[in-house]
Structures are given as structure tokens and as C-alpha cells.
Image (cartoon, coloured by chain):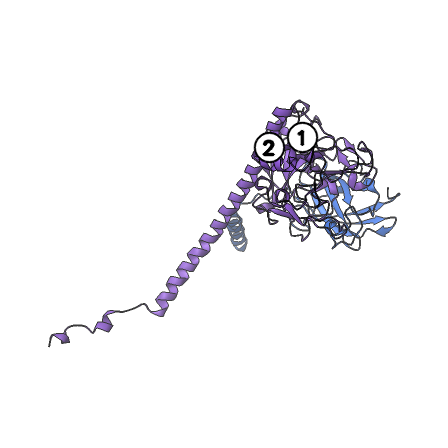
Chain colours: A purple, B blue
């Protein structure tokens, strides 16, 4: 009798209709669609900041090196038949918490950092496949880069280069302006370099030599993207690992033959605009990045970090690259 | 009325694009590079405004022609006088420096390849400009 007034137990559980469900799903989808680009933007900004922070660490390491040695690290010199040497990275390891890496390299042989060629040879004492070279160095890697923290550098033309992957180097030291104190190496157009920067072949630049002002002179620039190319990380003008700093033509001369010219691998001459995607010469690898808009982080000699847009005036850039050009620079 | 709608639409679009600064005016620049009368088949032309401003670059095609780019592909260069230099080396255009020999030989006299030694200049007018660079002399 009572049961007549009670609703049927099944009828009480009225569910969602299909339309309601679809509407809810659509709303959630729209919300996620709005959220994702924002998340992506934040991730990008974080990567760019991490990238800039690495530059800051390197600039501070350079300053500490300068305090200890009264000069910035040299862009390299050589005696005898040694080639493909390590450049400034090994010099500043102890100044940014990578002292153990330096100690390990020092253990390979006497004066290891100025005599071994890990980029070229696997055998001892070069030990090109040792973990100290094949493991990434966090401070050298821009997290925004699409290239990853290792630098594949094998080159089809020179089969004896054996180190397939070594730690990447996404920051190149300022080797000077293309238009100031140019040295036209006679070996090839690729061996032209400049002595107007902070780090260049046989350099011994002190803070007091930077007469344009340390806040107006570049110390490092970012070279961290292949900009869609498959192969920018390869060959000599590409983004080489930190294990190769410089090269002097020709092989057997002692001391170095400066007239022949040098290849500067871990320091670069400023010839092209930011994000330049065209043909370039070995010592003049352009500043590139994967940041939105294509601008790059740079470090100045006073340790300050700035983000330069892709459309930065090329002549202004070159003025920033020379340490004593006497130019007046206005940077927006 | 339609004009007003267009303006409103344009303003709305500009707002949507974050009110981007249109930047300096650029005019289309096309040209050709030859060496001893033959087209230079690959390389990159760089224009640097002597009065300051954004640089422009142009990829040289297989027929020696190029179109300059400042902000967007093919938009040209800022009007005025420019210093010009051309990077060009052996290897077809689609073969990037990385996949050529480690130090590819030159295909044009080296003096044209560097901003400090190149004698080339270009005058970009207020309207579409055509330029021709006839390179001569020994390679080295």
C-alpha cells in the first residue's frame, strides 16, 4: 500500500543526458585550450631566464678568473704540433663549481688543459670518450635550445673525428668586431679573425683594456639554435662542443703562425646580425636562439645580462663587440 | 561606412596582436649577383644601413637573384644608403656550410665577403628597388 507513494528506486537516479555531458566536456576542452598556451609561455620564459642565469654564472666566473689572474682567459696559444685544443671553458671550470671536472682533466697528463685534444682523439691522454667530456655541463647549456645538452660534432669529411657526442656549449665568448682590428689570415677566408674582443687567439685582455667601458662591451653571446637546420651542430662553423676551443694553421709550426690565421671555435667574431640564417664563415657563427622572437641573451663585461632583439642594429652590435673602438653606443 | 568598419577591424586586429610596434618602414629590394658575368649560385647578401637601423639579409638563388628580408620573408630593407657584403662559398645552396667541407673554398673574391673589406654599397629608394652586384677580380 505504502509503496504506491514511493518513487521507483531506479527512477530516482536521474543521470546526465548526452547533451549535458558533451557541453561539459566542450567547456573543459575550451578551458584547457586557454590554459595550455599560458603554461607554454611560462615554460618558455623560465627557460629563457635559466639561459640568462647560466650566462650570469659564466660572467661571474670570468670575473673571478680575472681577480685571480689579472687577465681574462686567453683565446688560446700553442707550441709545437698540438692542435684542436680546449679553450676558455677549462680555464674557468674552477670558478663556477666545476673544479672537479678540471681536476679530472689535469689528472690525464702534465699540463693537460693546454696539450690534450679530446675533440679529436679517443686515446690517452686525450680520452675523448671520457665522461668528463661526454657528460653535459649544465652551465653551458641553454634549456630553451632544441639541440639538447650534447653536441653531435661528427663530420663526414673528417672520419678521424671520433667523439660523436660531447658536452654542448651554447655560449660563445666575444672574439671582437668584424670591422675593428681585423686580421686577414692568409690560409683561407675561414681563418680571418679579430683582436678587438675580450677572448681571441693569444689574447691577454685585462679589465683596464676595455676602454669602451665594461657595460658597453660584450663578454658572451648566445649561439644555441640551428634555426631549423638539421646540421648546424656539425662541422667547424657549427655549434661545437666545449672540448674544442681554437686551431692554428699550419700544423707543424712552433710557435703559433699568426699570419696564417686561426679558427676560433669557442669565441666568435661579430659579423652578422642576430638570428642570421645565411651562409657564414667558421669564426663568425652568428648569435642564434630558439626563444620566441629570435632574440638572444648576451653578457656584458661588467657581468650584466641583457636580451637583445633580433632586429638589433648590426653596427651597434659590432660596436658592442669591440673593447676599445672608441665608439658611442646607444642601446634601446 | 565600410571604411569605418575596416578601420575598426584593423584596430581590433592590432589589439589582438598585442599592439605590435610596426617598426621602421621597409621597401622591397630585389637584385642579382654575378661574378665575371656569371650568376653566383648560392650565398647570402647582407645590407647594413649606414645611418643605423635594422640589417637585412637575402639568400641568393641558383640563378643569382635574391630578395632582401628585414622582418618578414621578402619584405625588403629600410630606405637609405647601405653597406653590403656577400657570404658565398662552394657547395650548392641547399647544402649548408655544415655539410660541406670543414672550410669550403670561396666562389667570389674574398674582399666582398667581409664588412670591413667589401666596397659594395646600395641605395634603397622609397619604392621597390632593384640592385645588381657585378663582382670581378681574382678569388683571393
Q: Position of residue A247 (x, y in %)?
A: 75, 39
Residue A178 lies left or right of residue A297; in this view the side is right
Q: Residue at x 16, y 72 (%)?
A: A6
| Image quadrant where residue B116 sits | top right
Q: Which subunit holds the residue at mark 1? A: A
- For the residue pair A219 and B24, the one nearer the viewer reads as A219
Q: Position of residue A43 (x, y in %)?
A: 50, 47
- For the residue pair B8 and A173, the one nearer the viewer reads as A173
What is the spatial separation of the Cα atoms under label 2 and label 1, in whole angstroms? 13 Å
Residue denoted by label 2: A94
Nearer to us of marks 2 and 1 is 2
For the residues beneath circles 2 and 1, the answer to whether they share a chain is: yes
> Which of the numbered marks, if any, corresponds to residue A73?
1
A208, above or below B12, in the image:
above
| Image quadrant where residue A76 sits | top right
Residue A8 is at least partly visible in this image: yes
Q: Position of residue A9 (x, y in %)?
A: 21, 72
Number of marks in the rendered image: 2
| Image quadrant where residue A115 sits | top right
- For the residue pair A32 and A219, the one nearer the viewer reads as A219
A234, above or below A267, in the image:
below
Q: Quadrant of the N terminus of chain A?
A: bottom left
Secondary element type, mark 2? helix
Q: Which subunit holds the residue at mark 2? A: A
Amino acid at each position: 500500500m505504502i509503496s504506491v507513494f514511493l518513487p521507483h528506486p531506479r527512477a530516482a537516479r536521474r543521470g546526465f543526458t548526452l547533451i549535458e555531458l558533451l557541453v561539459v566536456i566542450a567547456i573543459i576542452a575550451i578551458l584547457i585550450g586557454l590554459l595550455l598556451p599560458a603554461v607554454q609561455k611560462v615554460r618558455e620564459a623560465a627557460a629563457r631566464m635559466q639561459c640568462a642565469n647560466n650566462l650570469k654564472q659564466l660572467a661571474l666566473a670570468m670575473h673571478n678568473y680575472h681577480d685571480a689572474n689579472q687577465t681574462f682567459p686567453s683565446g688560446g696559444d700553442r707550441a709545437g704540433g698540438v692542435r684542436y685544443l680546449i679553450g676558455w671553458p677549462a680555464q674557468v671550470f674552477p670558478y663556477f663549481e666545476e673544479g672537479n671536472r678540471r681536476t679530472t682533466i689535469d689528472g690525464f697528463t702534465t699540463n693537460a688543459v693546454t696539450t690534450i685534444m679530446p675533440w679529436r682523439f679517443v686515446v690517452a691522454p686525450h680520452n675523448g670518450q671520457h665522461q668528463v667530456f661526454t657528460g653535459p655541463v649544465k652551465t653551458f647549456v641553454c634549456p630553451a635550445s632544441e639541440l639538447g645538452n650534447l653536441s653531435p660534432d661528427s663530420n663526414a669529411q673528417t672520419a678521424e673525428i671520433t667523439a660523436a657526442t660531447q658536452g654542448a656549449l651554447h655560449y660563445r665568448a666575444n672574439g671582437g668586431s668584424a670591422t675593428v682590428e681585423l686580421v686577414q689570415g692568409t690560409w683561407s677566408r675561414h681563418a680571418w679573425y679579430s683582436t678587438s674582443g675580450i677572448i681571441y687567439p693569444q689574447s691577454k685582455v685585462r679589465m683596464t683594456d676595455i676602454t669602451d667601458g665594461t657595460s658597453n662591451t660584450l663578454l658572451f653571446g648566445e649561439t644555441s639554435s640551428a634555426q631549423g637546420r638539421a646540421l648546424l651542430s656539425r662541422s667547424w662553423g657549427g655549434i661545437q662542443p666545449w672540448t674544442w676551443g681554437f686551431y692554428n694553421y699550419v700544423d707543424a709550426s712552433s710557435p703559433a703562425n699568426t699570419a696564417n690565421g686561426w679558427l676560433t671555435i669557442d669565441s666568435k667574431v661579430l659579423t652578422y646580425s642576430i638570428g642570421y640564417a645565411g651562409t657564414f664563415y667558421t669564426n663568425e657563427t652568428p648569435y642564434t636562439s630558439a626563444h620566441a622572437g629570435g632574440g638572444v641573451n648576451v653578457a656584458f663585461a661588467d657581468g650584466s645580462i641583457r636580451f637583445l632583439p633580433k632586429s638589433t642594429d648590426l653596427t651597434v652590435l659590432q660596436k658592442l663587440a669591440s673593447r676599445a673602438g672608441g665608439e658611442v653606443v646607444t642601446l634601446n | 561606412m565600410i571604411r569605418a568598419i575596416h578601420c575598426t577591424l584593423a584596430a581590433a586586429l592590432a589589439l589582438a596582436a598585442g599592439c605590435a610596434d610596426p617598426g621602421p618602414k621597409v621597401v622591397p629590394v630585389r637584385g642579382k649577383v654575378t661574378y665575371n658575368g656569371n650568376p653566383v649560385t648560392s650565398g647570402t647578401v647582407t645590407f647594413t644601413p649606414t645611418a643605423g637601423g635594422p640589417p637585412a639579409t637575402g639568400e641568393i638563388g641558383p640563378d643569382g637573384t635574391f630578395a632582401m628580408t628585414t622582418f618578414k620573408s621578402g619584405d625588403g630593407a629600410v630606405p637609405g644608403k647601405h653597406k653590403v657584403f656577400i657570404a658565398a662559398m662552394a657547395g650548392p645552396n641547399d647544402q649548408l656550410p655544415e655539410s660541406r667541407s670543414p672550410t669550403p673554398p670561396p666562389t667570389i673574391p674574398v674582399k666582398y665577403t667581409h664588412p670591413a673589406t667589401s666596397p659594395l654599397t646600395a641605395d634603397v629608394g622609397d619604392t621597390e628597388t632593384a640592385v645588381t652586384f657585378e663582382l670581378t677580380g681574382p678569388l683571393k
